[in-house]
Image (tube, grey):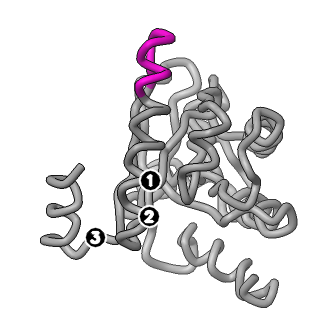
Amino acid sequence: LAALDAFCREKGFDGVDYDWEFPATREEHAAYDALLIETARAFRPLGREVTVALGALQTLDPAAYAAVDRIHLMTYDMGARHATYEAATAAVRRLVRDGAPKEKICLGLPFYGRKMDHSDTALAYADLLRDHAPAPAQDEAGGFYFNNAETLRRKTRYALEEGLAGVMIWELSMDTRDETSLLKAITDEIARRGGQ
């Protein structure tokens, strides 16, 4: 961990984000929990944060939830319609039931679509708009499922109303740079609600 701290110091990082998708055995699961707890114990006195990215069905032990500063819940890549509002909110409720403090959870928002009949095929939101010109309220186009701006506004409202830590996105380069921007929809919703 000393080398990891030195790397953070050299690069000017505030901390680390772990993303192990997915521990396959009980031993790996226990090792991941231990890594998060040990890193947090070493980094907290240094003022560094430890965050974790979790798949929508992934779990940690309660001690690991307590140790990390934030949980970036990847509420996408979940089935043919890979990022519905209903699946995302269900994933948050499940994580809270498993012992994760909701004030540490960042709701994951996709800036891409997945082919509904071939989940290995993805397309950036900007490319979806360019290639398929979906209607503004549409979350499906060209055989892809994605989140339109209104769906992301709704998910952002949910995160604010539920007292979550916020939202996180995957990933910015997939967005548009005009009025159709998903990032703009998210920031407009936060501003509309008083910057909660």
Task: Estimate the spatial distance between the alpha carbons at disc 3 and disc 1, rounded to whole Å.
Answer: 15 Å
Element type where label 1 sits in the image: helix
Q: Position of residue 118 (x, y in %)?
A: 48, 19
- Crowdedness of circle 1 by 10 Å Cα count: few (<14), some, many (20+)? many
Q: Is 94 left or right of 184, judged from the image as shown? A: right
Which label belongs to residue 8?
Answer: none
Q: Nearer the viewer, mark 3 or mark 1?
A: 1
Badge 3 crowding class, 10 Å Cα cut-off, few under 14, some 14 to 19, many 20 or more, is few
Residue 63 position by quadrant:
top right
Give the residue type at disc 3. Answer: Phe
Residue at numbered disc 3: 13
Camera-near label (3 vs 2) is 2
Q: Which residues are magenta?
A: 22-31
Which of pointers 3 and 1 lies earlier in the amino acid sequence? 3
Whether 168 is drawn above or below 143: the answer is below
Q: Is residue 18 magenta?
A: no
Amino acid found under the numbered disc labelled 1: Ala
- Residue behind mark 1: 40
Name the residue nearer the viewer: 148 or 152.
Answer: 152
In this figure, which residue is indicated by the disc labeled 2? 44
How packed mark 2 is, by other alpha carbons closer than 10 Å (few <14, some 14-19, many 20 or more), is some
Q: Quadrant of the C terminus?
A: bottom right
What residue appears at the point 63 percent right and 57 percent down from the top-left corner? 106
Tags 2 and 1 touching, CB below 8 Å: yes
Expressed as whole percent of the image width and height from the top left, the position of residue 97 reads: 83, 36
